Image (spheres, rainbow, N blue to C red):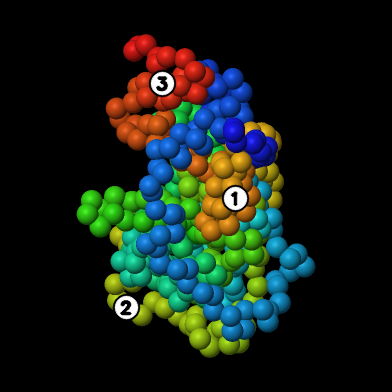
Amino acid sequence: MPDARRAVSVTINQQQAQLLDRLIAEGLGSDHAEVLAHGFRSYRAEHSDRPSAREGQDQPVPAESAGLQAYRRVGSEAGILLEPGTGKAVEVRRGHVLRVEQVEGGQCADFNAFNLNDYREAFNSGRTRVQYGLFPTTGDVLWSAPPRERPMLTIIADSVGSNDVSFPRCTAVLFESAWGYEVHTNCQDTLAEALREYGLTPDDVHDSFNMWMNTTVDPRTGRLGIEANLAKAGDYIEMLAHFDILAAISVCGADLSRTSNFALHPLLVSIREATGEELQRWPTEETRRFKNQRTPADFRVRDIRSERTLSRDPTYVPRWPVYPVVTQEVVVELADSEYAMARQLAERESFGPAAGDVLRYLFFSWCVEHFMHSDALTSETRLLAVPDATRNARAAEQGVGPAEPG
């Protein structure tokens, strides 16, 4: 007796729809629903014996709860909602706390930080990585780059504990070389656009503190990997500023990787005064204690630009490369057994709360394996090259013979 069918709604955005359109042109389906179903089933068949996404990973670090709710916010606003495709530069004064919070869950944020009164002093992922390891969390400090080399912000709360300082920010070149997009959301451009409000240029964007980016390292090869984003709605990170900081937050635009579970979601950013308990536990007194923590006064060439103090441009109007990020629903027919598997994964994994989230996650995981160009220097085409095995699998679904070699 044939399996009954179940309708599953899958949310995709306009960038992801472009990829599906290209797969339709390659003969992998007649519409978005067929392509999604084909990729979902192919991934299941190819990885039927793969362990679960969480197997072998450390459990998330619990949040420090003491005193975190007893605060008052600076200003009248409860926070700034950052929509997909956008970011924001905000001033965080010494002794104040920056909070970045998940609204819907599963969203990575790329973070840059600068000395508000000397923009050349900026966050350094390498110095932080050596001091605290690859996955900074509660109690760890974000350091500035040499020659200043000072603590900038302390992570005083982290409700998930899966952050990264290994991967660089995603860029437009990455999405063009890997997927063929001429325009795509990416953190380099988003951070550059946010920092433009304070007169900084794309050259000033630096490698990020990647909030909620769940990464791995192969102990044999040293290669980096990305696993499912573990953050849920309401999860947050709070950082205490050791001196006046200009912080920039990007809603990471990588919707074709596991970074944000193949979707883009909003984030909430707010600033508050630190509590007395927090200031006692993580004091913000002067941190330049060593002779070799140099300032521009120690340089032979001191002036890089005429104004070192950063101030916002009152005429600034943001121009995001891709905004708004528009979503659409695609209804995919699954067999009862497939639907039951998707629901089971939704309950025990971090792919999302609904069967459609699981389908989207597994489909784009399949796309990453089969269609992403991993070496920009050897790829001269921006067109998808569909492997014969993939064409043959599609032909088998349709009940026809294997594709002829091209």
Query: What's the mark number on residue 290?
Result: 2
User: Residue visible at 51% across and 74% down?
Assistant: 62
Query: Which residue bears the numbered disc 3?
Result: 392
In the foreground, 336 or 64: 336
Graded by Cα atoms within 10 Å as few (under 14), some (14 to 19) or many (20 or more), the crowding at tag 1 reads: many
Of the two numbered discs 1 and 2 in the rendering, the one whose residue sits closer to the viewer:
1
Give above or below for 50 relative to 383: below
Q: Are marks 2 and 3 in contact (CB under 8 Å)?
A: no
Name the disc covering residue 343, or none.
1
Identify which residue, 285 or 11, lies in the foreground: 11
Query: In 3D space, how far apart are the residues under numbered discs 2 and 3 (Cα atoms)?
Result: 65 Å
Q: Amino acid at mark 3?
A: Asn
Callout in the foreground (2, 3): 3
Judged from this view, the residue extending furthest toward the right is 76
Spatial separation of the CA atoms under disc 1 and disc 3: 29 Å
Q: Amino acid at mark 2?
A: Phe
First in sequence: mark 1 vs mark 2: 2
Residue 220's image quarter?
A: bottom left
Question: In the displayed structure, does residue 69 sit left or right of residue 138?
Answer: right
**Residue 159 screen position, x and y as percent:** 55, 70
**Sequence order check, earlier mark of 1 and 3:** 1
As displayed, is residue 219 above or below residue 95? above
Q: Secondary structure at mark 3?
A: helix
> Looking at this rendering, what residue extends furthest in the left direction?
220
**Residue type marked 1:** Arg
